[in-house]
Every structure is written in structure tokens, then in C-alpha cells.
């Protein structure tokens, strides 16, 4: 479990740097989830404030086609094309979405290896069937993703106990 926690923390620190230049961080993060040749176009959409009707259609089509693998494209369109959102807010939104996507993939890959289950089965269990131990309104994927937030100062024996109690009993 500590390896899972360490991996999630590494993803968070690499994708969402504390006060670094978000444009550079976003460029790097986008290259993880879309083809390199589309990164510049994605960054232009994020930094643009006004769109002509033709540009708007092209840009929303781009978001739908290239961002749907890591976020809800309808939600992204609302967020990215809202004139009240600053470039910084748009960058932060995308960085968080990419970090969530990468963290989720890491959890599935790690558990798939340990439990020797296909990721599709884990996805079904963690996102649809098993309820979260920590928050009954969530599914158990929430428990795994929150591992990144467990404080490092907690003694290892207590931390292991906390981690194990968040595991669903059938796993």
C-alpha cells in the first residue's frame, strides 16, 4: 500500500507543481494524455479568451475529440469557454483533471498487478459496485485516490492500519 501511496503522491507532485509556471506544467501534463502534435493547439484553446463562432466550433470539436479520454468533454467545454474563467483557472482545472486521470490509471494498474485481475474488472468493482469505506456517497476508488492525502507523519504501523481498513473486504 505504501508503494501505491508513493506513486499517487509522485503523480500529484509531477502534474500539479506548487507554485511553478502552470503553462509549462500543463504542456508536460497534456503530453501524457494527448498526442504531442496536439499539445500546442490545446494550449492555445486554454489561453484564448474570445472565439469567433467558427473558432468556437473548431475548438469545441477539438476538446471533444482529444480531451474525452481523460475528462468529461461537456464539462470541459463549459469550463474552458467560460469568459469569466481566467487562463490560470483553466490551467488549474486541466491539471487537476489530468492528475485524477493518471492517478486512477495508476491505481488500476497497481491493483491489477497485485490482485491479478483485469483492469476492466477492477474498474467495475471500484467505480460501480463497491461503496467507499470513508464516504458512503462515493465508490471505493475514492478510498484509493485519497491515499495521496494521508499525512507522512503518521507512524507506519498506524498508517498501515488506516490503509488496510479502507480496503473493501471482498478484495
Image: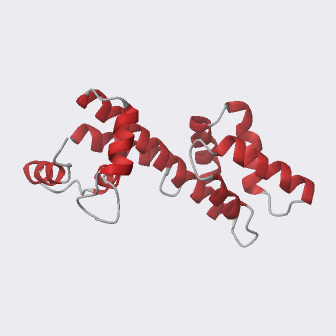
Direction from residue 122 to residue 69 in the image, left or right: right
Task: State which quarter of the image contains the N terminus.
Answer: top left
Task: State which quarter of the image contains the C terminus.
Answer: top left
* Residue 44 locus on image (x, y percent): 77, 49
* Residue 58 locus on image (x, y percent): 84, 48
Looking at the picture, does residue 109 appear above or below residue 130?
above
Direction from residue 130 to residue 104 in the image, left or right: right
Q: Residue furthest front?
A: 129
Q: Nearer the viewer, residue 92 or 122?
A: 122
Q: Residue furthest left?
A: 157
Q: Residue furthest bottom?
A: 84
Q: Nearer the viewer, residue 154 or 83?
A: 83
Looking at the picture, does residue 154 appear above or below residue 29?
below
* Residue 139 locus on image (x, y percent): 34, 55
Residue at 49% in and 51% down:
17
Looking at the picture, does residue 139 appear above or below residue 68?
below
Q: Nearer the viewer, residue 29 or 25?
A: 29
Residue at 25% in and 37% down:
3
Q: How is the image coloured?
A: secondary structure
Direction from residue 99 to residue 6 in the image, left or right: left
Q: Nearer the viewer, residue 50 or 87?
A: 50
Number of disc labels: 0
Residue at 75% in and 62% down:
81
Residue 12 in sight from this viewpoint? yes
Amino acid at each position: 500500500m505504501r508503494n501505491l501511496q508513493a506513486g499517487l503522491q509522485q503523480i500529484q507532485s509531477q502534474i500539479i507543481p506548487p507554485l511553478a509556471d502552470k503553462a509549462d506544467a500543463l504542456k508536460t501534463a497534456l503530453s501524457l494524455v494527448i498526442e504531442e502534435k496536439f499539445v500546442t493547439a490545446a494550449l492555445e484553446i486554454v489561453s484564448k479568451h474570445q472565439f469567433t463562432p467558427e473558432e468556437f466550433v473548431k475548438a469545441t470539436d477539438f476538446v471533444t475529440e482529444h480531451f474525452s479520454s481523460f475528462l468529461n468533454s461537456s464539462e470541459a467545454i463549459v469550463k474552458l469557454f467560460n469568459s469569466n474563467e481566467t487562463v490560470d483557472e483553466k490551467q488549474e482545472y486541466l491539471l487537476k483533471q489530468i492528475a485524477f486521470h493518471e492517478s486512477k490509471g495508476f491505481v488500476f494498474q497497481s491493483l491489477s498487478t497485485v490482485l491479478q485481475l483485469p483492469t476492466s474488472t477492477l474498474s467495475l468493482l471500484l467505480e460501480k459496485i463497491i461503496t467507499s469505506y470513508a464516504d458512503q456517497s462515493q465508490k471505493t476508488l475514492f478510498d484509493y485516490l485519497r491515499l495521496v492525502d494521508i499525512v507522512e507523519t503518521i507512524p507506519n504501523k498506524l498508517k498501515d492500519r488506516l490503509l488496510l481498513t479502507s480496503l473493501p473486504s471482498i478484495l
